Image: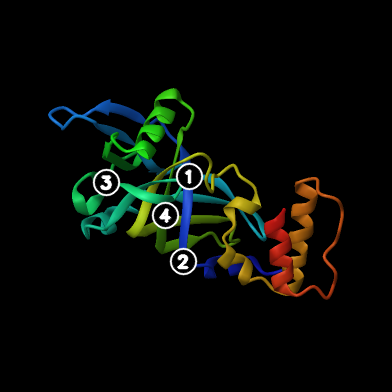
Amino acid sequence: MSDKSERAKVAGIVRRAFAVQLEVRAKPGAAAGVSSIEGYASVTEEPFEMWDWLGPYSEVVRNGAFAKTLSETPQVQLLLNHGGLAMAYTKAGSLRLSEDSTGLHMEADVNTGRGDVRDMVAAIEDGAVDEMSFAFRVTRQMWSPDYDQRDILEVDLHRGDVSVVNFGANPATSVAPAMRSADFDRLGEDDARALYERLQRRLAAPEQPAPAGMPLYQAQAALLAL
């Protein structure tokens, strides 16, 4: 199996989801049909468990991780499940981000004249969705000597998003949703087969070990089909 130090080499856009309390309220003085949504897209100083191809590890976003990127006026959009049309945008002033002792706070003005926005607002009010996620790049991090804890010290939010999500790359999820395709592409043949077989066991799939000669792209396709 690969050495755990390989964890520190993974880069690119990542997403993390947190269970949060989202609030919807009418915005005073705003035009009819505009509501305000408030919550936290990230929580700091709260370690949580993540999984990758080497197994579990602990991750924590440290206080101050957002200070630099927020000072640079990043372009960030509010999305639903990290997709679709933007519902609010920092560039337009309808999405406002700040960092406090809890984490990355967001407040957004959304137009409930849009059907997708109405559906999202109704789901929040009904308590049917209660998680937020954010897409970001890690610009500064620190790993423990045994590579079993990752401290995220600084992130870049520019051209990322904050999203209301059903379930995202949540700290409590298993390998499959928490692992990015870019991570999988870094695996060697033996590690890819080992992960494929672990996921089969975890998901109670029939025992069908990946053949020794299975190319990496076939193992990846089989993983995605689980």
Locate residue 222, reporting x and y percent. Answer: 74, 61
Q: In the current view of this chain or complex, which residue is farthest to the top?
A: 126
Q: Amino acid at mark 3?
A: Leu
Tell me whether circle 1 and circle 2 mark residues in contact (CB < 8 Å). no
For label 2, the residue is 12
Q: As drawn, is 53 to the left or to the right of 93? A: right
For label 1, the residue is 17
Lower sequence index among marks 3 and 1 = 1
* Residue 135, numbered circle: 4
Determine crowd level at label 2: few under 14, some 14-19, many 20+ residues with C-alpha closer than 10 A: few
Lower sequence index among marks 1 and 4 = 1
Tell me whether circle 3 and circle 1 mark residues in contact (CB < 8 Å). no
Q: CA distance from mark 1 to mark 4?
A: 9 Å
Q: Secondary structure at mark 3?
A: strand
Locate residue 113, reporting x and y percent. Answer: 28, 35
Q: As drawn, is 92 to the left or to the right of 189? A: left
Lower sequence index among marks 1 and 2 = 2
Q: Amino acid at mark 1?
A: Ala
Instruction: Please name whichever residue, 87 or 23, is drawn nearer the observer in this view of the structure.
Output: 87
**Residue 182 in sight:** yes
Say which residue appears at 56% left-offset and 62% top-offset: 145
Q: CA distance from mark 2 to mark 4?
A: 10 Å
Q: Secondary structure at mark 4?
A: strand
Locate residue 132, reporting x and y percent. Answer: 43, 41
* Residue 97, numbered circle: 3
Instruction: Please name whichever residue, 105 or 218, is drawn nearer the observer in this view of the structure.
Output: 218
